[in-house]
Image: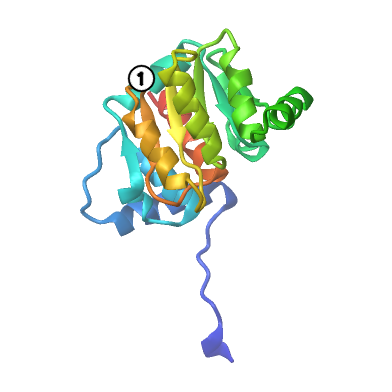
Amino acid sequence: MDKYKIKLQKVLPGEIEKRSFEIITEELGNVELDPLQAPIIKRAIHTSADFDYLENLYFSDNVVKKIQEAIRNGACIVTDTQMAKSGINKKELAKYGGEVYCFMSDEDVAGIAKINGTTRATASMDKAAKLDKKLIFAIGNAPTALVHLYELVKNGKIKPEGIIGVPVGFVNVVEAKELIMELSCPCIVARGRKGGSNIAAAICNALLYGLRDE
């Protein structure tokens, strides 16, 4: 039975993430990445073990610098799931005066969604639009949130500092992402069906850690 034994790498707990990124870099080989985009792409791959993010992630012009500058100036992050909120490093964001919001579980959001016949994600974008704060949106689950965010921007009701549009799924997901890429707003979008709350949080954290590492 010895020949069936699995050979495990001896890695200390504190070194697992470091070794994971080393493996990702090794497997990328000679692929040349934009130095500002590379940490975001690699963290998305690290979170998902999916190298498709090398090709899937769309970056608008100077989006990394623009969103990081917004964070420096105290911008807050609005997400569409408690999972994404939980995954974002709130201590890092708080260093710059920012907070993370998710309104999906709020009673008033549920009530408005019921009255208007919309999703909670749509209603939560309306609530976010009323905040008197600089906002970055990190959408990893609900394409309806992205669609309504697009409408709010086009109607001049909100001007986000940046949009991270990475919902996962099959219904209106691709189309919602395409709408966001049409805006002049700084954005990072996972084209196609792939994404998720974990990817939204990973991208936020990559942006935050990029500030820490400066």
Q: Label 1: few (<14), some or many (≥20) within 10 Å?
A: some
Residue sitting at 44 percent across and 39 percent down?
A: 176
Residue 79 visible in the shown view: yes
Residue at position x 48%, y 46% in the image: 172
Q: Position of residue 5 (x, y in %)?
A: 56, 82
The image's colour scheme reads rainbow
Residue 195 spot, x, y in % from top left: 48, 47
Q: Is residue 99 visible?
A: no
Q: Quadrant of the C terminus?
A: top left
x then y, percent, for residue 110: 74, 30
Which of the 4 quarters of the picture holds residue 144? top right
Q: Residue at x 37, y 50 (%)?
A: 53
Whole-percent x and y of residue 173? 47, 46
Seen as rendered, the residue at the extreme top is 132
Front one among 12 and 50: 50
Q: Relative to residue 144, is residue 44 depicted above or below?
A: below
Give the position of the N terminus as an image quadrant.
Answer: bottom right
Specify the quadrant of the image occupied by residue 42: top left
Labels in figure, total? 1
Q: Is residue 84 left or right of residue 69?
A: right
Of residue 145 and residue 115, the one placed in the foreground of this image is: 115
Instruction: Give the SS element for disc 1.
Output: helix
Closer to the camera in the image, 89 or 22:
89
User: Would residue 201 be found to the left or right of residue 127 on screen?
Assistant: left
Outermost residue to the right:
107
Q: Is residue 90 above or below residue 172?
A: above
Q: Is residue 20 left or right of residue 65?
A: right
Residue with the mark numbered 1: 66
**Identity, as a three-letter code, of the amino acid under mark 1:** Lys
